[in-house]
């Protein structure tokens, strides 16, 4: 159930949650109504996580309790202690809590990878086999760390109402894969919400659009890129390699963008405004602009938590450009480590860190003198080559893939079969639609229909729900892939 496109979620969990939640709009007293609705959402969020595993819920609740108490302790020290003691104590508690959060995340993300390092049969079978990566832990751990830092820096006050704080952490629309919300953005919505039909309508449309993209597009994109990466690396050829990595990048974007649409749509239905996570990243003209558009909540977290503090601490050190580069490399090293427990993710993070550094030093000035199309092609090339590190976890495969990309090979039977397969009408249609989505064409069409006449908007909505019927048919046939970013 813990995937938005599962039948149990769509036809049991959501209807029950909707009915109970909206029933409390009949309560006349606003403060009581919101508290009751928060309770419903927190309870259903716990059910949502526990359906995957009670263990996952226990870990999330324990982490929430630790950081809830820790936040209050930091706030209390801020108010009551004298200045020297206050600063030392607050910093000590903050560092201690962050260490705990990072150790818990690191244990589940990196400890299983040590199975290849240690080879003690009983230890392997008894310990490593019992470690399962908890649902959503990467996202709510970063959420909790930023919450503590914001209290320490006096940007917010510690939340004393555990019902509200628990909902902030466990809210099921954002639990699996974000967005990584800041508490100051979420706080007001926990205490006051009104029923607004336009917001519910927009939420439903956005959720359905996300569901359609996930079910109708992502599976075919995955199968197309998978055809390339499932080949033995000796069978790769340049056209197939370029097609495979381009399709993988498209798949990754559509998959995560569809999740974000569904999460934000669900938030709107319940009266919450979640932050946007994507803004047409493939239309960017530099790596810097790409990261302002791709996984925006993570980019903002990395900037505010890693990059800006590093720059502040090193602002007087010379040569300044060295520390600018070090800050960017450190930031994207953390990004790579956050994504996975293998070296390919570190290489992926450093790949982006290197190009960002080059842009800061001189490359962006050069790019801005070039035509916009050339800048755009540069970005597409850099990002797609970076996806090679993201997709392949073997150094041998990465080396072979890069060598194939730039060395033409003879036409062979594998390439012929691949080209025939990729030319199927359903695959061509899916790729074409996915490219139009990544270019923002359908978003512009929706805005245009809304601004023109209700007839155009009605036609748009009819098409969306006809596609929903196709999505339900796919679900009935058991065609559904989990969200790729849920693995991180």
Image: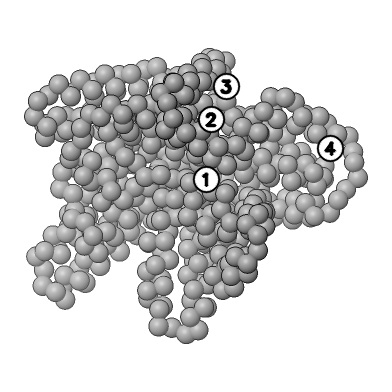
Quarter of the image where one finds residue 273: top left
Q: Quickly name the residue at label 2.
A: 213
* Residue 487 appears left or right of 393: left
| Residue 280 disc label | 1
Q: Quadrant of the N terminus?
A: top left
Please tell me whether mark 1 or mark 2 is closer to you in this view: 1
Disc 3 from disc 4: Cα separation: 27 Å
Q: CA distance from mark 2 to mark 3?
A: 13 Å
Decide: is 233 above or below 102. Answer: above
Residue of label 3: 479
> Reading the chain from its start, which is encountered first: label 2 or label 3?
2
Tag in front: 2 or 4: 2
Mark 1 Cα shell of 10 Å, populated few (<14), some (14-19), many (≥20):
some
Q: Is residue 181 left or right of residue 126?
A: left
Q: How is the image coloured?
A: one colour
Q: Secondary structure at mark 3?
A: loop
Disc 3 from disc 1: Cα separation: 27 Å
Label whose residue precedes the other's in the sequence (1 or 2)? 2
Residue occupying image coordinates x 80% and y 55%: 406
| C-alpha distance separating marks 4 and 1 | 32 Å
Query: In the rendered picture of this protein, how many numbered marks are placed on residues?
Result: 4
> Which of the pair 392/113 is nearer the observer?
392
The x, y position of residue 158, in whole percent, is 19, 53
Q: Secondary structure at mark 1?
A: loop
């Amino acid at each position: 159930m813990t995937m938005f496109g599962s039948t149990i979620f769509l036809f049991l969990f959501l209807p029950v949650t909707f009915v109970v939640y909206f029933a409390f709009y009949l309560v006349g007293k606003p403060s009581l109504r919101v508290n009751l609705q928060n309770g419903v959402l927190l309870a259903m969020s716990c059910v949502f996580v526990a359906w995957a595993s009670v263990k996952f819920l226990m870990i999330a609740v324990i982490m929430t309790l630790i950081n809830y108490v820790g936040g209050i302790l930091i706030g209390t020290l801020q108010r009551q202690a004298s200045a020297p003691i206050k600063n030392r104590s607050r910093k000590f508690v903050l560092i201690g809590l962050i260490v705990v959060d990072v150790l818990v995340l690191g244990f589940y993300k990196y400890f299983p990878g040590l199975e290849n390092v240690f080879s003690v049969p009983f230890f392997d079978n008894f310990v490593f086999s019992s470690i399962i990566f908890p649902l959503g832990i990467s996202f709510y751990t970063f959420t909790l760390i930023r919450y503590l830092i914001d209290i320490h820096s006096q940007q917010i006050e510690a939340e004393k109402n555990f019902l509200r704080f628990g909902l902030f952490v466990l809210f099921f629309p954002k639990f699996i894969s974000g967005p990584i919300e800041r508490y100051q953005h979420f706080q007001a919505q926990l205490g006051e919400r009104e029923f607004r039909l336009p917001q519910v309508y927009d939420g439903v449309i956005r959720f359905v659009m996300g569901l359609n993209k996930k079910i109708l597009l992502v599976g075919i994109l995955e199968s197309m890129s998978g055809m390339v990466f499932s080949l033995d690396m000796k069978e790769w050829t340049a056209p197939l390699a370029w097609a495979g990595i381009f399709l993988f990048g498209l798949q990754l974007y559509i998959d995560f963008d569809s999740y974000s649409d569904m999460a934000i749509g669900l938030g709107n239905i319940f009266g919450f405004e979640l932050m946007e996570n994507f803004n047409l990243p493939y239309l960017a003209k530099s790596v810097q602009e790409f990261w302002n558009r791709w996984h925006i909540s993570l980019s903002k977290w990395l900037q505010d938590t890693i990059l800006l503090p590093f720059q502040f601490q090193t602002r007087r050190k010379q040569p300044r450009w060295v520390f600018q580069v070090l800050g960017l490399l450190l930031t994207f090293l953390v990004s790579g480590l956050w994504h996975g427990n293998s070296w390919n993710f570190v290489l992926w993070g450093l790949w982006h860190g290197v190009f960002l550094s080059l842009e800061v030093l001189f490359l962006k000035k050069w790019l801005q003198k070039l035509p916009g199309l050339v800048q755009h092609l540069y970005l597409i090339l850099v990002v797609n080559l970076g996806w090679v590190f993201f997709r392949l976890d073997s150094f041998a495969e990465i080396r072979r893939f890069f060598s194939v990309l730039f060395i033409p090979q003879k036409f062979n039977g594998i390439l012929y079969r691949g080209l025939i397969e990729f030319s199927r009408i359903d695959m061509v249609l899916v790729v074409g639609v996915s490219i139009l989505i990544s270019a923002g064409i359908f978003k512009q069409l929706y805005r245009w229909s809304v601004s023109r006449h209700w007839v155009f908007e009605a036609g748009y909505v009819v098409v969306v729900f006809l596609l929903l019927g196709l999505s339900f048919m796919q679900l009935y046939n058991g065609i559904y892939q989990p969200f790729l970013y849920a693995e991180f």
